[in-house]
Image (spheres, rainbow, N blue to C red):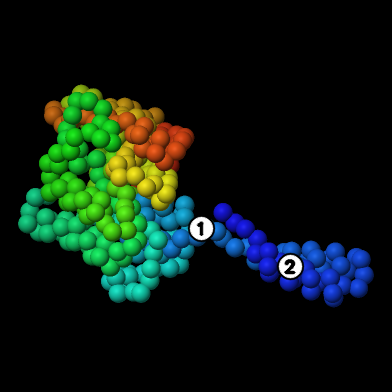
Amino acid sequence: MHAFDYGNAKKIISSCIIKSFSRSNFFVTIGNAISNIKVVRMNTKNIAIIGANSILGQAIYERLVDDHTVYQVYNANVTNIKSHKNLIQIEDFLKSNLSFDVIYFISAVITFEETSTKINQLFFTNVNLLKTISETFATSKIINASSVAVFQESNHTLIETSPLLPKSSYALSKLWAEHLVATHQGGGVNIRISSLYGVGMKKNTFLPKMMQSAIQNKKIIIFGDGSRKQNYISAKEAADYFCDAMHYAGSMPLLAVGKQSYSNLEMANMLVEMQSEVKIELEGQDNSSSFTYDNTLTKQELRSNQDYSFYELIKEVLEWMQKQY
């Protein structure tokens, strides 16, 4: 929300009236004065994004930077960060005397390896770093990027209140993080995300690997009959939920998921339509579970009415990947 600084305007215009000696000169001077009236931003917040180098971190930054003061906090890499304004390394951030209204905790280690080394990494970033931020910025609101991995597997459509049963150390770390945010002094919001995609994403998950194979090998290998369904949400869509959550005061964890889930075969056929001369090959078996979601409660709480084209967003990412090879 923007408002005029009326006190400043009154002084400028009064000065113009005194200094203007002719009618024509008066209106010219008034016009110049109005153009110099200071615009004051109302409800401007100080915001920090932990994990600003991620595709979600950048999508949130782009949504907020015009209306708020946003600090971009990174660990080591800044390759995805377009603007280096208010850029700060995590150690310097923790030592700073800065204060924030809202802190987005997007940073995360994502691994399903169960070695002691990987588990230590999961705890250090996903849990311990979040706890340190909670203690250092006790009065800030924390909005945490969690994962649908915390849910119990089910043949039914999952909603915000579905039972939880994390099966991996990664999923456990995300549920632990949710507990820290739920009990944080300054209040917080947990947002569970499905498979995230977007321009600049890492190429270590199913969707980018499928795109890479289509581009480089002109074929897509699908295990089983391709009927397993997965859910995808673009960084742009997810950023809408995270930004809207700034004003959410409820305790229910929110659900940031795509409008529908797609089978692996449906995704492969979509990519074949976009990338010429690509063949689909079915191999072996796929015993993994399908996942479908309904986040109606989240949309109601945030008054969200998103209208993104999944096809166009996937096409945008594929075109970006084509330029990489």
Q: For the view shown, which residue lies furthest in the right direction?
A: 22
Of the pair 112 and 253, the residue shown nearer to us: 253
> Which residue occupies 17% across, 33% down?
153
Residue 319 seen by the camera: no
Q: Give neighbour class at mark 1: few <14, some 14-19, many 20+ (Cα, 10 Å).
A: few
Q: Is residue 92 left or right of residue 125?
A: right
Q: Is residue 159 left or right of residue 65?
A: left
Of the pair 190 and 18, the residue shown nearer to us: 18
Occupied quadrant, residue 290: top left
Q: Disc 1 residue type?
A: Asn
Q: CA distance from mark 1 to mark 2?
A: 23 Å
- Percent x, y of residue 41: 56, 60
Q: Is residue 5 left or right of residue 317?
A: right
First-in-chain label (1 vs 2): 2
Q: Is residue 303 left or right of residue 143?
A: right
Q: Give neighbour class at mark 2: few <14, some 14-19, many 20+ (Cα, 10 Å).
A: few
Kindly identify which numbered label has been placed on residue 10: 2
Secondary structure type for disc 2 = helix
> Which residue occupies 7% across, 53% down?
115
Residue 204 seen by the camera: yes
Kindly identify which numbered label has been placed on residue 43: 1
Secondary structure type for disc 1 = loop
Q: Disc 2 residue type?
A: Lys
- Percent x, y of residue 2: 59, 56
> Which residue occupies 18% across, 29% down?
154
* In the depicted structure, whether residue 15 falls above or below residue 44: below
- Percent x, y of residue 311: 42, 33
Quadrant (top left, top right, bottom left, bottom right) of the N terminus:
bottom right
